[in-house]
Image: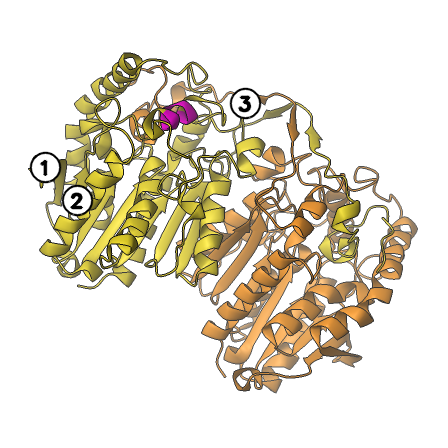
Chain colours: A orange, B yellow
Amino acid sequence: MVTRFFPLAVSAAAALLVAVPVAAQTLAPREVPAKTLPVPTTVSPQMQAIIAQPLRTNWDKPPTTPDGWRELSESNVTTVAPQIPAMAERMRVSIEPSMLDGVRIYTITPADMPPQNRNRLAVHVHGGCYVLNPREAALPEAIFLAGFARMKVIAVDYRMPPEAYFPAALDDAVTVYKAAIKMVPPANIAVFGSSAGGALTLEMMLRAKQEGLPMPGAIAPGTPMSDVTKQGDSFQTNAMVDNVLVSPDGFCDAATRFYANGHDLKDPFLSPVYGDVRGFPPTILTTGTRDLLLSNTVRMHRALRQAGTEAVLQVFEGQSHAQFYRDDRIPEVKEAFDEIGLFFNRHLGQ
Amino acid sequence: MVTRFFPLAVSAAAALLVAVPVAAQTLAPREVPAKTLPVPTTVSPQMQAIIAQPLRTNWDKPPTTPDGWRELSESNVTTVAPQIPAMAERMRVSIEPSMLDGVRIYTITPADMPPQNRNRLAVHVHGGCYVLNPREAALPEAIFLAGFARMKVIAVDYRMPPEAYFPAALDDAVTVYKAAIKMVPPANIAVFGSSAGGALTLEMMLRAKQEGLPMPGAIAPGTPMSDVTKQGDSFQTNAMVDNVLVSPDGFCDAATRFYANGHDLKDPFLSPVYGDVRGFPPTILTTGTRDLLLSNTVRMHRALRQAGTEAVLQVFEGQSHAQFYRDDRIPEVKEAFDEIGLFFNRHLGQ
């Protein structure tokens, strides 16, 4: 084997054979100088405006008390809730809150549905690091799927700390899933959600396997928190690049530990990338090139492919964490949900 | 519309409605401080060793004369050529150089082929920024596809500067494609290659459309140089992170300009992301999270999906440019080529 290092080996073919034995390597880190990242011009003007936003205010100053988390969470609801009616009107959906087997839900029904969707149902689990986005704040992504894909959605307003801790969110999501499979055939059901909701989507499949429940027809975990132990290269490469999550040591990490309540973060019910994903249904994963969870997403994609799952990946240019559902008036948001809708349509029963 | 910016909006649902009108935004760049990137532990030990390599020596000191480029190119051949026999033995393929309609080629034939591959053919166009990797240096990726997918491959050793300039590489590739479609039905043909070879794969489809040639059954452009005008966010975000291409102002940019020879770099025959890709065959694209061409790859994926093409994307954790074909003994390399082989098998005629 040739082990000589040659100067300026260019594309991979030339460089390929520098296979120094691993044991002989010092695994030196890469020193990356400070840089100024312009806003890319390769996205829509609307998305440029989102990318140009500064790092989230107070990203490194999370609440430290249950009351502090509750206040933050309520302030988000106060911001989002007044915008829901106009959003529902643009998307032509109606929204009905209710309880389902003891769990708070919203049922989102499109004003019109194509025939193939009339006996289908999507279950939505919202994001927010397991602590944020209760009530109306849970709704935007659910509304977008209902609106763009013209499918009925049940959005789970699961319990969160300080009301209840791990695994309450998952328990509530599974309760709703159990009810859903009595409403329509499991093959006609999709499960979706992003960030913590992406992780919950995957955790629901692990729990369904454990309990012997049937799999749904398809799932769409967006930028899932599939590994909350901070493993994954993009936690470093996209730190201070992603303007939403910003850093692996930011508020989302603090929130997740608040939910985990001392439980091992490597448990597949918190970090599903470590779970046995054999038998998972067809899966579409979504992320962005600046996403702190880019690695969480592509590692999950690889794990699913290695297990033989029909899993596809979409990565959006320049987007930070979960910006693919930032606002329904952004072209890339319609594009992402159109793709998810097409994927569901391809894989769900009718 | 609510335009108030609220503190610590967490995952996208909460943050989503900060839709300040675009015109009112100052599109401020992001200032990213210097950072130290550890080698990720989320890849194989062999890939960790590749990721830990320092930035390519002399990445910012490309040759400035035709003789300088020729010397560099020859030094790469000198390094790679002696390793080809062992590689061919590991992959159980034979290699035969010849001429096909005036173009230099290598025919790579697996020692055994499954029945479904016996009337199939893959055409390979190598990478090297349109200037590097002639002769044996062109072969590794072609050998890996032949070896892992057990398919016959014709590798095009196309003319490069200073022997010939744009569009000579494309002309040679298309000459071989025209010969190939006389050997087996076009639907049984795959075209693949990475970096400049990924761009050439796409350029061949544009040229085939222009000349009214039939499309092949499937293509696999790996980390394509789909935009050589330096547009694309990862040219900035992954600058000094990617240890192969390193920077948009490095040797690959210089090499491409040497090939283009004054031609407009935005011409779709040099930057195929700007081409009309309607009617392209099923496509699998491959890249890595540290790849300088991550954006080139995901933008191409989006362009193909927008045109209605069956296009799938695989993104490998922690890899810089084209490291998915660095060495056949790396688990992630087998994984990438197994996926490409599965995709070809799904989409090619027999």
For label 3, the crowd category at 10 Å Cα-Cα, with few meaning under 14, some 14 to 19 and many 20 or more, is: many
Residue B328: image x %, image y %?
A: 28, 36
Q: Chain of mark 2?
A: B
Q: Distance from label 3 to label 2 (Cα)? A: 43 Å
- Residue placed under numbered mark 1 in the picture: B102
Q: Chain of mark 1?
A: B
* Numbered label attached to residue A198: none
Seen at 16% across and 61% down, the residue is B116
Q: Disc 2 residue type?
A: Thr
Element carrying mark 2: helix
Residue A258: image x %, image y %?
A: 78, 49
Residue A216: image x %, image y %?
A: 53, 73
Front disc: 3 or 2: 2
Element carrying mark 1: loop
Residue range (magenta): B252-257
Element carrying mark 3: strand
- Residue placed under numbered mark 3 in the picture: A30
Q: Is residue A195 visible?
A: yes
